[in-house]
Image (tube, helix red, strand yellow):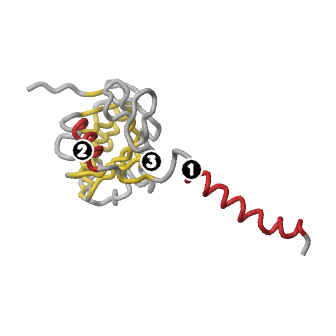
């Protein structure tokens, strides 16, 4: 067997090995659990807060709306409306969530270093109000919320992940980083 023939057969193996090595050395990688202290800081920063986003605007028709609230665990409420009527409205809720982080960074940093976190909902439930009422009629076990800059109110942004793509309208929505408006609540 000639050297060229051996190299031809080894090329795919060498390419895969190089890609695996590069991904393990880089800052990006699979999501990993964060330490308990870091998870508590992120959950404390989100606790009792609510964020909303409406496209294109509050009074537009049609309009898409999403509310993320962290008042008792996590809740994602979504609505697609035309004129003043909800065409589709549903929510995903979970009493608790885990915080995972992508990459090898060990801490949340300042000065531009803001790793991506994923909020993985534990035992989420799905409830639909419109067009028909149903509970847990859609499997939402793969749904998650990604978050950047969770400790910085001026830079916090979210994206919503639905890999199975089976959520009703207004999804898919906010699959890229979006700065949601924070709701203000007064006692």
Q: Horizontal placement of 172 versus 5: left or right?
A: left
Report the quarter where the N terminus lies.
Answer: bottom right
Which of disc 1 and disc 3 is earlier in sequence?
1
Residue at 22 percent of width and 39 percent of height: 44
Which of disc 3 and disc 2 is earlier in sequence?
2
Mark 2: which secondary structure? helix
Front of the two marks 2 and 1: 1
- Residue positioned most to the left: 187
Mark 3: which secondary structure? strand
Count of number-bearing discs: 3
Tell me residue 83's x, y (percent). Answer: 33, 30
C-alpha separation, residue under disc 2 versus residue under disc 3: 17 Å
Residue at 17 percent of width and 45 percent of height: 72
Dividing the picture into quadrants, the one containing residue 89 is top left
Which of disc 1 and disc 2 is earlier in sequence?
1
Q: Which mark is residue 102?
A: 3
Q: Is residue 17 above or below residue 185?
A: below
Circle 3 Cα neighbour tier, 10 Å, few/some/many (<14 / 14–19 / ≥20): some
Q: Label 1, on which residue? A: 25
Tell me residue 71's x, y (percent). Answer: 18, 40
Tell me residue 21's x, y (percent). Answer: 61, 56
Q: Evaluate if marks 2 and 3 touch, with contact meaning CB atoms under 8 Å apart.
A: no
Q: Evaluate if marks 2 and 1 touch, with contact meaning CB atoms under 8 Å apart.
A: no
The foreground one among 84 and 187 is 187
Q: Label 2, on which residue? A: 40
The foreground one among 29 and 54 is 29
The foreground one among 147 and 51 is 147
Mark 1: which secondary structure? helix
- Residue positioned most to the right: 2
């Amino acid at each position: 067997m000639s050297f060229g023939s051996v190299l031809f057969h080894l090329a795919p193996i060498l390419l895969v090995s190089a890609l695996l090595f590069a991904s393990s050395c880089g800052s990006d990688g699979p999501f990993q659990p964060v330490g308990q202290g870091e998870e508590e800081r992120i959950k404390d920063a989100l606790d009792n807060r609510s964020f909303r986003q409406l496209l294109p605007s509050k009074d537009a028709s049609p309009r898409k709306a999403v509310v993320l609230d962290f008042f008792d665990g996590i809740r994602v409420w979504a609505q697609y409306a035309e004129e003043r009527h909800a065409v589709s409205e549903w929510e995903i809720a979970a009493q608790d969530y885990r915080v995972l982080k992508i990459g090898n960074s060990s801490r949340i940093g300042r000065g531009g270093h803001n790793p991506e976190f994923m909020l993985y909902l534990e035992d989420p439930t799905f409830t639909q109000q419109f067009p028909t009422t149903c509970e847990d009629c859609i499997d939402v076990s793969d749904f998650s919320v990604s978050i950047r800059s969770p400790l910085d109110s001026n830079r916090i942004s979210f994206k919503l992940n639905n890999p199975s793509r089976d959520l009703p309208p207004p999804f898919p929505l906010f699959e890229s980083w979006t700065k949601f408006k924070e709701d203000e609540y007064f006692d």
